């Protein structure tokens, strides 16, 4: 089932999300609905706060990035078919070179900006069967995970921009929260009486 994506300005996007346990109600159905919602919006990641749930759950499928001709063959292979659910994730370390990459967000449609992040992360998380993992990721894969991880920490990619850039985007962000934007997927706007 395709769920509406929560737009910029909703307080749920600013909450530090809570851990869940294996008894969380209808978890497999929720994950399935999140995949449907993400693919319907042509996303590569989606976090539970983006559908209104302040829980530590996000999912990533980087397959669409694998076709990027600017990437090395190794990078393309790393991204191809990487599909993972992250539950109760905690980034242990962020290391390596800082590098910019143009990011966007399903909760902030039509806004894309260069964001600087570190190259490599070590993250612990549970998969959908509540099996524990501790893994290191780098490059574009690490970046997608960092972006989604930020959502469960109440952080948006726009927070990582310079104060000047944020001021320049203020009007557009206000319009998004009011629903004054055309999107081709379902959204729920905090400052509007109507969702789409």
Image: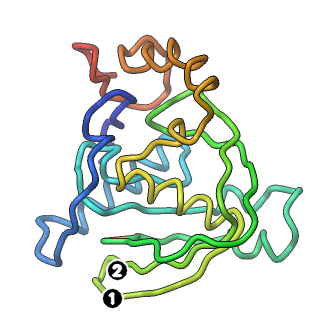
- Label annotation for residue 70: none
* Residue ID at (21%, 67%): 27
**Residue at (53, 60) in percent of width and height:** 146
Left or right relative to 29: residue 176: right
Q: Tag 2's secondary structure?
A: strand
Left or right relative to 36: residue 25: left
Q: In which quarter of the image is the C terminus?
A: top left
Categorize mark 2 by other alpha carbons within 10 Å: few (<14), some (14-19), many (20+): some
- Crowd class of label 1 (few under 14; some 14 to 19; many from 20; radius 10 Å): few
At mark 1, the secondary structure is loop
Q: Nearer the viewer, residue 166 or 187?
A: 166
* Picture layout, residue 31 above or below residue 114: below
Front residue of 91/27: it is 91
Residue holding disc 2: 126
Provide residue 193's location: percent of width, then percent of height.
22, 13
Q: Which residue is drawn at 47% across and 20% down?
A: 173
Counting every numbered tag in the picture gives 2
Residue 10 x/y as whole percent = 29, 31
Are dots 1 and 2 in contact, CB under 8 Å?
Answer: yes
The mark nearer the N terminus, 1 or 2, is 2
> Where does the image place residue 134, in percent across and percent down from the top left?
46, 87
- List the single residue furthest toward the front: 163
The figure's colour scheme reads: rainbow
Instruction: Note whether 156 is above or below 169 in the view shown.
Output: below
With 41 as the anchor, is 139 left or right in this view? right
At x 65%, y 56%, the residue is 117
Is 124 above or below relative to 113? below
Residue to which mark 1 is pinned: 131
Snapshot quadrant of residue 68: bottom right
Residue 100 is left or right of residue 49, and the answer is right
Cα gap from disc 1 to disc 2, whole angstroms: 5 Å
Image spot of residue 64 (x, y percent): 67, 56
């Amino acid at each position: 089932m395709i769920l509406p994506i929560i737009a910029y300005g909703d307080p749920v996007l600013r909450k530090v999300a809570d851990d869940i346990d294996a008894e969380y109600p209808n978890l497999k159905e929720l994950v399935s609905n999140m995949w449907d919602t993400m693919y319907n919006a042509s996303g590569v990641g989606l976090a539970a706060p983006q559908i209104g749930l302040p829980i530590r759950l996000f999912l990533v499928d980087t397959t669409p990035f694998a076709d990027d001709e600017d990437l090395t063959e190794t990078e393309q292979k790393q991204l191809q078919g990487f599909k993972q659910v992250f539950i109760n994730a905690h980034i242990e370390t962020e290391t390596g070179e800082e590098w910019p990459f143009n990011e966007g967000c399903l909760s902030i449609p039509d806004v894309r900006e260069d964001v600087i992040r570190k190259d490599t992360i070590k993250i612990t998380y549970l998969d959908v069967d509540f099996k524990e993992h501790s893994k290191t990721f780098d490059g574009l894969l690490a970046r997608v995970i960092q972006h989604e991880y930020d959502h469960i920490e109440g952080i948006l990619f726009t927070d990582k921009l310079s104060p000047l850039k944020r001021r320049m985007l203020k009007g557009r962000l206000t319009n998004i929260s009011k629903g004054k934007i055309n999107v081709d997927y379902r959204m729920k706007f905090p400052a509007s009486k109507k969702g789409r």
